[in-house]
Image: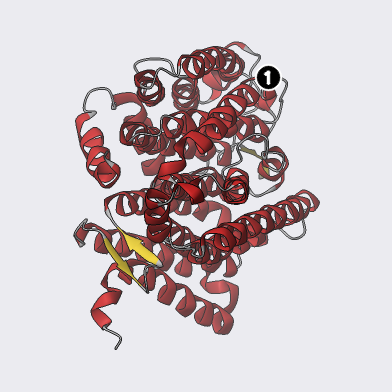
Amino acid sequence: MFDPMQLIPLVPELLICITAITMLMIGAFKGNKVTISLTMLAALALVGSAYILMQQPADTVTIFHGMFRSDSITQYAKLLILFAALMVLILSVPWLQRKETKRFEYPVLYLFAVLGLLLMVSANDLLSLYMALELASLSLYVMAAYERDNVRASEAGLKYFVLGSLASGMLLFGASLVYGFSGTTNFETLAALFADSTDQVLSPALIVGMVMVMVGFCFKISAVPFHMWTPDVYEGAPTPVVAFFAVAPKIAALVLFTRFLMQPFEMLVMQWQQIIYFVAIASMLLGAFGAIRQTNIKRLLAYSSIGHVGYALVGVASGTAAGVQAMLIYLSLYIFMSVGAFGFVMMMRRDGKAMEDIAELGGLSKTSPRSALFMAIMMFSMAGIPPLAGFFGKMYVFLAALEREMYILVIVGLLSSVVAAYYYLKVVKVMYFDEAKDKFDGETMLSSRVVLALCALVTLLFFIIPTPLIDMTASAVSVLAR
């Protein structure tokens, strides 16, 4: 008999789902005139969901016959997703107020995407994993092509859809191989099976299935060699949508990727570790060298995001709880750097037209000193220059790799950081040393200024009080400790 109390771990997701459906009905009857009101309602739903999540105990609970799991690491990841989504949604309001983008579908799609990401994190079965992944992906495909009258946005949405469908197909085929050669799709059952049976561990077809699922994940986090969609989609999609792409889906996919590897496939660490090792190195190198020739700020940040995924995967490659903790610290700090950088790009408007060329930042320190200082902080932090937050994020993942004696991984990471510093510092050089351009429009809401100020403060001052974040991530990974 069904027990309604089983739904308690699912209350945050239910709140998001009910709010999204209600908003869809209101928008269908009221039209685009309620877009901003619905956006505020979506923000309240995100806050309410986060509050409910913080009230729940961090105990390990599984419901729906083991398909949905709630524990300390899933709760922490969900809080990161909700916080990142809230910041980006607040920054999106000025963009939504413009006539050409003021459509009620945006906040509805936004909430459905967040719902899919939250369910992804708690997926405890290959089937629930796939369903949650597709719920999020379908919403993201439409959001990428949200500016339907813009050719570049339509192209971005189509590329993302076609390549994303291919990746989803590979993930699903990999899941079918895992099921075919193990007889189950449940994470806990798989873990028990591998722990008891050496024959299953050595099955080549099972390894192939695991690798194909990993391919699907690598696409979702834009890791090399499945990164090809990232620069074009980041350039063509609306900047608020790209800001969302850069943080929330990556957090969800990386945490689910980690759980997939370290819970059901923990006994196969020697098989998957070498794949993560290669992907991390390739992502760091391509992220560093690929951005050097970029002149579009959004394409530069796209390659930057590929590099940051590589750094996060260094923690995963260690195969330890300490490595996962380092990854969570890195992702927590990356949220503020990425949201801050894209928030700045959203403000790059001149005479009502969006500016994306790095050359348009020429002499910004003279026309808008505070904006130039803010972007300089974000760039220095992404480059990993101490004592900014980005330095400590990289330090923790490198220390986790050093504990496992992965010296090549650390050396490549350090060298790629040096190379990447070139294009980050190029942006700072343009703002402070190039000839001044006309001043940007400078229309920024108070709420947006608060979000950007928070990003700057965390990036600047993390080194003063790092203990709360370290303690929270240590508690989150306690479920993986071994």
In the rendered view, tell whether residue 169 sits above or below residue 438: below
Name the element at disc 1.
Answer: loop
Quarter of the rendering containing residue 318: top left
In the rendered view, tell whether residue 159 sits above or below residue 300: below
Quarter of the rendering containing residue 431: top right
Regarding residue 404, the answer to whether it shows in the image is: yes
Instruction: Identify the residue position indicated by label 1 in the image.
Output: 292
- Residue 132: x percent and y percent? 51, 64
- Residue 360: x percent and y percent? 67, 27
Image side of residue 55 versus residue 284, left or right: left
Give the colour scheme of this rendering: secondary structure
Residue sitting at 34 percent across and 20 percent down? 403
Local crowd size for mark 1, using a 10 Å CA cut-off: few (<14), some (14–19), many (≥20): some
Residue sitting at 43 percent across and 46 percent down? 255
Q: The residue under label 1 is which amino acid type?
A: Ile
Image side of residue 221 versus residue 87, left or right: right
Image side of residue 346 versus residue 340, left or right: right
Q: Residue furthest right?
A: 151
Q: Quadrant of the C terminus?
A: top left
Residue sitting at 41 percent across and 56 percent down? 193
Q: Nearer the viewer, residue 62 or 347?
A: 62
Q: Nearer the viewer, residue 448 or 23?
A: 23
- Residue 338: x percent and y percent? 49, 36
- Residue 232: x percent and y percent? 73, 41
